Amino acid sequence: MPAVVRRDEGARPVGVVRAFAPCGPGRHAVVSWAQRQAHRTGARTEILVDPDRPAGGRSPVDLLVRGFDLLTGWSSLVDRLGRAAAGARLLVVPQELDGLERLVDTAYEAVAVVPPDPPRHRGPVVLALASRTGDEAVDAAFEAAACRHAPLLALRYRDPERAAVVTSEDAAEATSEERRTWSERLAAWRFAYTTVPVDVEVTDGDPALELVDVSGHARLLVVGRSARGRLLGSLTPSPVAAVARHARCPVLVVPPGGPPRRSWWPRT
C-alpha cells in the first residue's frame, strides 16, 4: 500500500526529518514543526500521511508517491513508526497519537512529540536532567538551543518522597553540591556552544508534574529516554511518557546509544 511522502527541495541535505502527519487537528502543527526543524539543521523533510487518505491539492513542498514498506504490513502502527524512525535524524509525531507512550519508549531514534497548538513565545530550551541522563540528550539540547538562538535551562527535579530525611541545612548543601556537579558536567558543552546562555537549577518536586508545568513557558523540552530496562522500569517508571503526552510545548525524547532496551536489566 503506497504512502505519501512530501519532500522539501533545496541543497543536498544532511539526514532526514521524518514525520507522521495523520488527518486531525494536530496535523498542521506536526508538518510545520518538522519543516522548521529540517530547515534549521539542513536536513531533508519526509512527511508520512495516512495511506488511506490521500492528501489533496498542492503545497509549498512537492508530493512524491511511492511504496513505503515501513508503513505497510500487519504490525501495529506504533511498531511501524518505530521502524520508520530507524535511519532518520528525527521522527516527529502528534501528541494525540495512540500508543505514544510505547513509541517514545522503543523508537530507534529521537522522537519529537508536538502538541496540536504549540506555544509561539520565545522561551528557553529546557533540558530535563535525571541521574541517568546521557550525553545524547545533552548534545540534542545544546544543538537545539544553538539552532534557535535560545537560552538553555537545565532542570533537575528530585522527588522528595524518595529522598532521605535530613535537616534543612543538609538539604540545601546537597542541592548546591548537585548543582555544582551538573554545572561541571555541562562545562564541555558550554565551551563548545559559547553563544548559548546556560542556567542550571536543582530543586525538589515530582519530575513529571513539574516538567509539564515548565513546558508552558518553554519553546522545547528535551528529555533523555530511560535505559533502566524492564525490571527497574516496572518498579520506578520513567516520567518521560507522561511528560510527552501532557506537555504544552514540543518534547524531544532522546534515546541512549545503542538499540532500544528490551531486556529486564539496566544498561551499564
Image (spheres, helix red, strand yellow):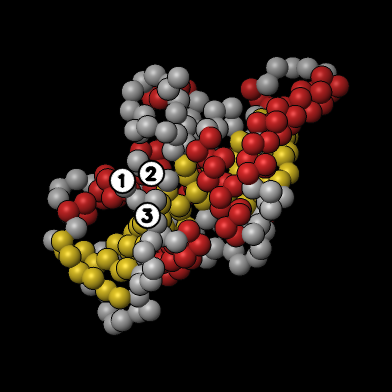
Binning the other alpha carbons within 10 Å of mark 3 as few (below 14), some (14 to 19) or many (20 upward) gives: some
Q: Nearer the viewer, mark 3 or mark 1?
A: 3
Secondary structure beneath label 1: loop
* Residue 6 in the figure: left or right of residue 160: left
Binning the other alpha carbons within 10 Å of mark 2 as few (below 14), some (14 to 19) or many (20 upward) gives: many
Where residue 167 sits: x, y (%)? 83, 18
> Does label 2 or label 3 sit earlier along the sequence?
3
Q: Which residue is mark 3?
A: 15
* Residue 51 in the figure: left or right of residue 178: left
Query: Quadrant of the rendered structure where residue 199 is?
Result: top right
Query: Residue flagged by tag 2: what amino acid is it?
Result: Glu
Q: Nearer the viewer, residue 29 or 255?
A: 255
Q: Are marks 1 and 2 in contact (CB under 8 Å)?
A: yes
Q: Which residue is mark 2?
A: 109
Q: Which residue is mark 1?
A: 86
> Does label 1 or label 2 sit earlier along the sequence?
1
In 3D space, how far apart are the residues under numbered discs 3 and 1 (Cα atoms)? Answer: 12 Å
Secondary structure beneath label 2: loop
Query: Residue flagged by tag 3: what amino acid is it?
Result: Gly
Where residue 41 sits: x, y (%)? 48, 58
- The image shows residue 170, relative to residue 61, as above or below, that is above
- The image shows residue 114, relative to residue 173, as above or below, that is below
> Does label 3 or label 1 sit earlier along the sequence?
3
- The image shows residue 123, relative to residue 138, as above or below, that is below
* Residue 71 in the figure: left or right of residue 213: left
